[in-house]
Image (cartoon, rainbow, N blue to C red):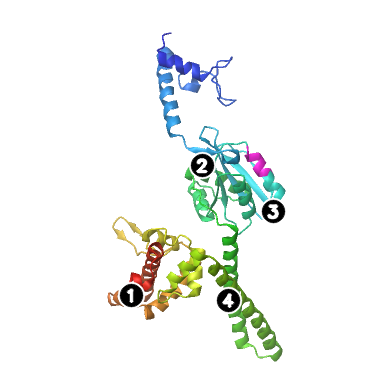
């Protein structure tokens, strides 16, 4: 058998073991010519495949993607790099891998979190995918991040749509972990910086403020229809307590913003716009940190005020908004209602749309997007309303 120098060099690099199997081939696979796609090809087939092997190795080395091992060490992606999916519940953490299935279950406790980190420490990983589950995932995500592992928190809706696209309709904790692993392997979601402890606490206070407002509204409605003096006294005492807590939460939020020079500057810029008050500026600062860092198209899509097409063939469907961040959108809606009366630029745009035959809801949505675009540009350029709009 005659081999050129390149083929001989490849044979040396393949490092045949004593049984005639290339080192690194997983156990249980056939050990004959079928491994290299050479069945029935003869000597010429070996020469062709070995030359192809050289090109494949070279291209793989040049274009391999990075993966992470223990302590966040960056290595080239190999055939053994896996995607990890962790399904989180209140009591348990179900973990699975892709492409090779190896299901595990750990308790959702500090001891269970440590066991997960210990098991994953020696592995090469593309990504660890975890669904957002209302807070139960925070502890294990923090533990994985401290260990320097590539953890990504994803939207559950996206993962469920991915499962349906594959025809997976059944749903259990273990099946969800397998779907998460496959999602990470196929989609490879990008890593994003997670909010720090201070930001999470501020968001919790903002959420608590919304809850208190809802309770105040509910108790006020009950008081309106209550006729018993004892019931009215009970409702009034509850209302007094809720209003005190609401005022305390608002004072804490304002104090936090004043203590941060960057947040205070952004809040002053936003509140210079007619229609933007303290509550809207607080919500935008805390719930929309990307403001001023994205293009106008990106920020509109992020909030959920970008018109989405619904076209097919000759059909031109009605554009609608969908998705985004509902808390930000609700506050922006109320600010826009005020701006259509007191902000000259927004009022002019609103009247122009109404005169063009647009319905009021559509015109308000368009004004929300315009107001958001103005705020995004002001934060990016660090200009007040009067400076940006002489």
Q: Vertical placement of 77 versus 147: above or below?
A: above
Q: Quadrant of the C terminus?
A: bottom left
Q: Is residue 227 left or right of residue 150?
A: right
The stretch of residues the image draws in magenta is: 115-121
Residue 345, quarter of picture: bottom left
Residue 366, quarter of picture: bottom left
Q: Tell me the tag on residue 185.
A: 2
Q: Are marks 3 and 2 in contact (CB under 8 Å)?
A: no
Q: Name the N-terminal-most of marks 4 and 3.
A: 3
Q: Name the N-terminal-most of marks 4 and 1.
A: 4
Q: Is residue 355 visible?
A: yes
Please name which of the two marks, 3 or 1, marks the residue nearer to the observer.
1
Q: Name the N-terminal-most of marks 3 and 1.
A: 3
Q: CA distance from mark 3 to mark 2?
A: 26 Å
Residue assigned mark 1: 345
**Mark 2 residue crowding within 10 angstroms, few (<14) / some (14–19) / many (20+):** many
Instruction: State the image coordinates of residue 273 (x, y, percent, origin top left).
Output: 40, 74
Residue assigned mark 4: 213
């Amino acid at each position: 058998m005659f081999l050129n120098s390149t083929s001989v060099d490849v044979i040396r690099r393949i490092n045949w073991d004593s049984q005639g199997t290339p080192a690194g081939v997983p156990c249980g696979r056939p050990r004959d010519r079928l491994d290299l796609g050479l069945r029935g090809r003869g000597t010429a087939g070996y020469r062709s495949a070995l030359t192809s092997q050289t090109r494949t190795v070279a291209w793989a080395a040049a274009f391999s993607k990075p993966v992470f091992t223990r302590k966040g060490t960056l290595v080239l992606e190999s055939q053994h790099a896996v995607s990890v999916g962790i399904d989180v519940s209140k009591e348990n953490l179900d973990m699975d891998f892709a492409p090779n299935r190896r299901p595990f279950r750990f308790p959702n406790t500090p001891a269970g979190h440590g066991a997960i980190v210990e098991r994953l420490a020696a592995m090469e990983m593309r990504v660890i995918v975890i669904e957002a589950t209302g807070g139960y995932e925070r502890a294990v995500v923090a533990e994985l991040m401290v260990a320097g592992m590539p953890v990504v928190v994803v939207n559950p809706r996206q993962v469920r749509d991915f499962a349906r696209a594959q025809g997976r309709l059944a749903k259990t904790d273990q099946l969800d972990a397998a779907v998460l692993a496959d999602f990470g392997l196929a989609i490879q979601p990008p890593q994003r910086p997670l909010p720090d402890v201070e930001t999470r606490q501020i968001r919790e206070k903002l959420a608590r403020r919304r809850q208190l407002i809802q309770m105040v509204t509910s108790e006020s409605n009950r008081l309106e229809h209550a006729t018993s003096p004892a019931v009215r006294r009970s409702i009034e005492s509850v209302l007094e307590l809720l209003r005190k807590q609401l005022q305390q939460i608002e004072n804490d939020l304002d104090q936090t913003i004043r203590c941060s020079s960057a947040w205070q500057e952004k809040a002053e810029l936003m509140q210079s716009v007619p229609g933007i008050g303290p509550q809207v500026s607080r919500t935008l600062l805390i719930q929309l940190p990307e403001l001023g860092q994205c293009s106008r198209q990106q920020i509109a899509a992020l909030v959920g005020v970008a018109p989405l097409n619904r076209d097919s063939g000759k059909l031109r469907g009605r554009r609608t908004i969908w998705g985004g961040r509902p808390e930000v959108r609700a506050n922006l809606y109320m600010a826009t209602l005020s701006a259509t009366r007191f902000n000259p630029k927004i009022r002019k745009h609103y009247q122009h749309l109404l005169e063009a035959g647009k319905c009021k809801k559509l015109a308000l949505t368009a004004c929300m997007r315009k107001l958001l675009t103005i705020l995004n540009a002001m934060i990016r350029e660090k200009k007040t309303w009067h400076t940006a709009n002489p």
